[in-house]
Amino acid sequence: MPFSPYGQALGPTTHSANLTAPSRRVGDPSALIPPAAPRLEPIPLPPMSVDDTSLNALVIYASHPRIQHDVRRHPGYASAPTGRRHWSEEPATNPPTPKMVIVCMVLPRPFVVYPASRDSNYVTVRDLLAATHDAFREAVQEAVADDDIDETWVPAFSM
């Protein structure tokens, strides 16, 4: 027998001659049915935010939006509830964050919102509205350039 570094002989085993060849004929039809797949549990999606950041109440989706804004128009035309004089300069998140990544299902790709002012280290409601306006305008321009839609089409959007 040849030498094996693992302490076993390499060669035919004594009981291998007694095995019969597998048959291609199956007498029991149930043998052809594979076993049932294990039932998988759904995997929960990751949280919308990796920390305890929440959106400003002005920009949360609501059936009665707190901000009246048409994304086809500049954010300077947006209006919010009376009594809030500087609402557009409020942080868009709590605690304030230096950037936001927005994913919108009617836009071709996510977009990132940064503070417009170098003096600010957080995204404001105005920054969010301006970035949303720009993202929609860019998407419409790309679609028109690709002849996918006509220029007057803009998806409905409100905050």
Image (tube, rainbow, N blue to C red):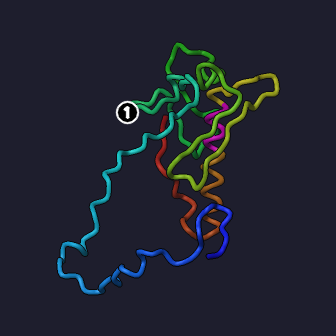
Within 10 angstroms of label 1, few (less than 14), some, or many (20 or more) residues?
few
Left or right: 135 as drawn, with respect to 63: right
Most common secondary structure along the magenta stretch: helix
Q: What is the quadrant of residue 50 in the picture?
A: top right
Q: Nearer the viewer, residue 143 or 46?
A: 46
* Residue 54, horizontal then vertical, whole percent: 54, 24
- Residue wearing tag 1: 63
**Could you tell me which residue is drawn at 23 percent across and 73 percent down?**
31
Q: Amino acid at mark 1?
A: Ser
Q: What is the quadrant of residue 1 in the picture?
A: bottom right
Q: Nearer the viewer, residue 85 or 135?
A: 135
Left or right: 82 as drawn, with respect to 123: left
Image vertical order of residue 96 relative to residue 45, above or below? above
**Could you tell me which residue is drawn at 73 percent across and 30 percent down?**
115
**Could you tell me which residue is drawn at 50 percent across and 32 percent down?**
68
Q: Residue furthest right?
A: 118
Q: Residue furthest top?
A: 83
Image vertical order of residue 82 relative to residue 131, above or below? above
Q: Residue furthest bottom?
A: 24
* Residue 131, horizontal then vertical, whole percent: 66, 40
Q: Write down the region rendered in magenta.
A: 127-133
Left or right: 63 as drawn, with respect to 28: right
Image vertical order of residue 57 relative to residue 147, above or below? above
* Residue 116, horizontal then vertical, whole percent: 75, 32
**Could you tell me which residue is drawn at 65 percent across and 75 percent down?**
2
